[in-house]
Amino acid sequence: MPNASPYIVAVANQKGGVGKTTTAINLATALAAAGKRSLLIDLDPQGNASTGLGIARNDRRLTTYDVLSGRATLAEAVRASGVPDLMVVPSSVELAGAEVELVDVPNRENVLRDRLKGALVSWDWVLIDCPPSLGLLTLNALVAAHSVLVPLQCEFYALEGLSHLMRTIERVRRNLNPELEIQGVLLTMFDKRNNLSESVAADVREHFGDKVFETVIPRNVRVSEAPSHGKPVLIYDLRCPGAQAYVHLASEVLKREKRAA
């Protein structure tokens, strides 16, 4: 993949609590550790990806809200994350107002894509952490991205919510972004002691086949602890099962893109 053409991945699921932000942070960190210059765009008004990379809420002078509103360029809003080769555009609660403000903007679905155009040559990979909804912010991410990575918690209603997201992705591909692909479905919070986890994993693999990553992210207390320390779990405890799973995920993601290139 040439440096002049970074690969953009939207990390999306309209359901909260599925490991979306954790995946965005730790996959970006693992890609950076693999020598890929990476950018994480926090597009969630909750700003948890920013917090998880150690950026305090009172230390976010320019955010994704400023980029979307045209008050700042991407280059002005980008800042270091504390992880080598990983930069971040932080979020703030102001971003919640962007959905309302975008309603009256012409070509409102294309605002993020237009703001990113020509501004990403410094990176190999760009990950967008989407809000847990299918509103205008997520729609902007899907229009701007090359692919979607869908974290999916191993729980009873997992497939029910996923079908709605897949229909949205298909509509975006048909009407707004014909290049959009499914990067993969990632099983998260997997508990091998729980028969339900095994059952859900089997169902998801039956429905989506090789779109489901081989890597599964285990339920792991160190993964849960890491954000409160403002660190990706790969920095907090590299040897724990959760961190190792994200290392394997990054390897799998890179192999998939190599095959697709």
Image (cartoon, helix red, strand yellow):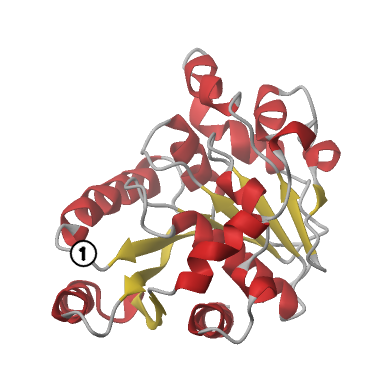
**Quarter of the image where one finds residue 198:** bottom left
Measured as percent of width and height from the top left, residue 18 is found at: 36, 57
Q: How many marks?
A: 1
Residue 179 in view: no
Q: Is residue 154 left or right of residue 181?
A: left
Measured as percent of width and height from the top left, residue 161 is found at: 22, 51
Residue type highlighted by circle 1:
Glu
**Residue placed most toward the observer, 190 or 123:** 190
**Quarter of the image where one finds residue 229:** bottom right
Check the picture and name the quadrant holding the N terminus: bottom right
Q: Residues within 10 Å of mark 1 (few under 14, many from 20)?
A: some
Measured as percent of width and height from the top left, residue 40 is found at: 66, 54
Task: Reply above or below: 27 against 40.
Answer: below
Measured as percent of width and height from the top left, residue 174 is found at: 34, 46
**Quarter of the image where one finds residue 106:** top right
**In the image, what residue occupies the spot 53% across and 40% down?**
44
Residue 139 in view: yes
Check the picture and name the quadrant holding the C terminus: bottom right
**In the image, what residue occupies the spot 21% across and 76% down?**
197
**Residue placed most toward the observer, 51 or 222:** 222
Q: Is residue 17 left or right of residue 26?
A: left
Q: Secondary structure at mark 1?
A: loop
For disc 1, the marked residue is 155
**In the image, what residue occupies the spot 21% across and 64% down?**
155
Task: Reply above or below: 126 against 43.
Answer: below
